[in-house]
Image (cartoon, helix red, strand yellow):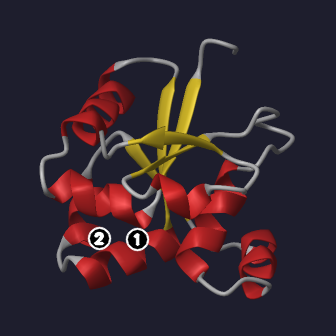
Amino acid sequence: MSDELHVVLDDTAMVAAGHGNIIVSGLIHHAHTRPGCFLYATACALVEADRARPGTAEHIAALPGITILELDLPAALAVAREHTWAEAHTRYAAEPAADLPNGAFIATTAPDRWKGQPVRVIDLSQ
């Protein structure tokens, strides 16, 4: 289990996927072809990404290596306390949980957005 990689794409990473960002493209490829590599997209971040770049939601949802995380009741309660749904749902998905004790990384092209928050980041802007 320690060799597994769990990554949540934020809305900026989803938009970057449509622009051919090589790092996010690599993550998508690995999630589809390598056991132990898991890639997630939250429903709230998917909406925000589609607002920024129409067509992104359909593109991300069609990729076989990405699991779409719905806004279930625990996630909705976490989101309700925050200002932005996309960031709150993404952070909630990346937090440690019983089935994922170390949490997940957040892939982003805006790493400053996550400064000071208890999350691990993969910087896609490099």
The image quarter containing residue 85 is bottom right
Q: Label 2 near label 1: C-beta < 8 Å?
A: yes
The image quarter containing residue 1 is top right
The answer to whether any part of residue 82 appears in the image is: yes
Residue 113 position, x and y percent, is 54, 63
- The quadrant of the rendering that contains the C terminus is top left
Residue that appears at 36% across and 63% down: 12
Residue 17 position, x and y percent, is 23, 52
Residue 108 position, x and y percent, is 42, 52
Residue that appears at 30% across and 84% down: 51
Residue that appears at 31% across and 46% down: 125
Amino acid carrying label 2: it is: Ala
Q: Residue furthest right?
A: 98
Q: Which mark is residue 60?
A: none
Label 2, secondary structure: give it: helix
Amino acid carrying label 1: it is: Leu
Label 1, secondary structure: give it: helix
Q: Which residue is mark 2?
A: 57
Q: Earlier in the sequence, mark 1 or mark 2?
A: 1
Pick the residue in front: 18 or 117: 117
Q: Which residue is mark 1?
A: 46
The image quarter containing residue 87 is bottom right
> Vertical placement of 14 versus 7: above or below?
below
